[in-house]
Amino acid sequence: MNGAALPEELDYLGFIDFAIDHTRRELPEIDPDAMRLVLTLHRVTNALVYDLESSVHRPRGFSWAGFRVLFVLWLAGPMEAKRVAELSGMSRAAVSALVNTLERAGLASRRRADHDGRAITLTLTPAGRDAITDAFRAHNQREQAWAATLTEAEHVTLVGLLEKLMAGATTATTKRRH
């Protein structure tokens, strides 16, 4: 694909139209609607995560990934690291590396699982519980700000469509983390 001149005023979300137009010229057989869906979903998700991480989580000393681990432990209680990885949508290696950081910060602890000496059980510390409840209050305020751009009916429709998309991904031959 040969590069085309990018308009100066093009921004992160505006790049979608540019990408679709350029790709259609180079590869006329592509499905522009599927491309728009995936690009828009990906870019909005990235913008949302960046907003949450930069305005809520980083100021509190942890990353988006750290928040996800703390959130799972807060909701589900002590559990094996492999299950935390599954529920947070992360790899076991990523959770293991994150736990080192969370443990040093006094937010989580680990111990050998009672049933299997090779398995690690992760637990939220009292400081971790305080950190996640504080962070989640601020996190939810940002969620409310994002959700406020939709009417109640649009919110219900969007959630339903996203759930349908996820259900389709689980029945299709889609690679997913387990």
Image (cartoon, helix red, strand yellow):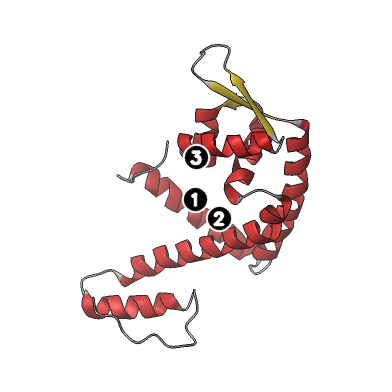
Mark 1 or mark 3, earlier in chain: 3
Mark 3 or mark 2, earlier in chain: 3
Tell me how far mark 1 sits from mark 3, CA to CA: 26 Å
Residue 128 at x, y percent in the picture = 73, 37
Against 101, residue 112 (above or below) is above
Q: Which mark is residue 163?
A: 1
The residue tagged with tag 2: helix, strand or loop?
helix
Relative side of 118 to 48, left or right:
left
Q: Quadrant of the N terminus?
A: bottom left
The residue tagged with tag 3: helix, strand or loop?
helix
Q: Residue furthest front?
A: 104
Q: Which residue is mark 3?
A: 94
| Dot in front, 3 or 2 | 3
Against 104, residue 18 (above or below) is below
Query: Total number of numbered labels?
Result: 3
Tell me how far mark 1 sits from mark 2, CA to CA: 6 Å
Give yes or no for contact between labels 1 and 2 (Cβ–Cβ under 8 Å).
Answer: yes
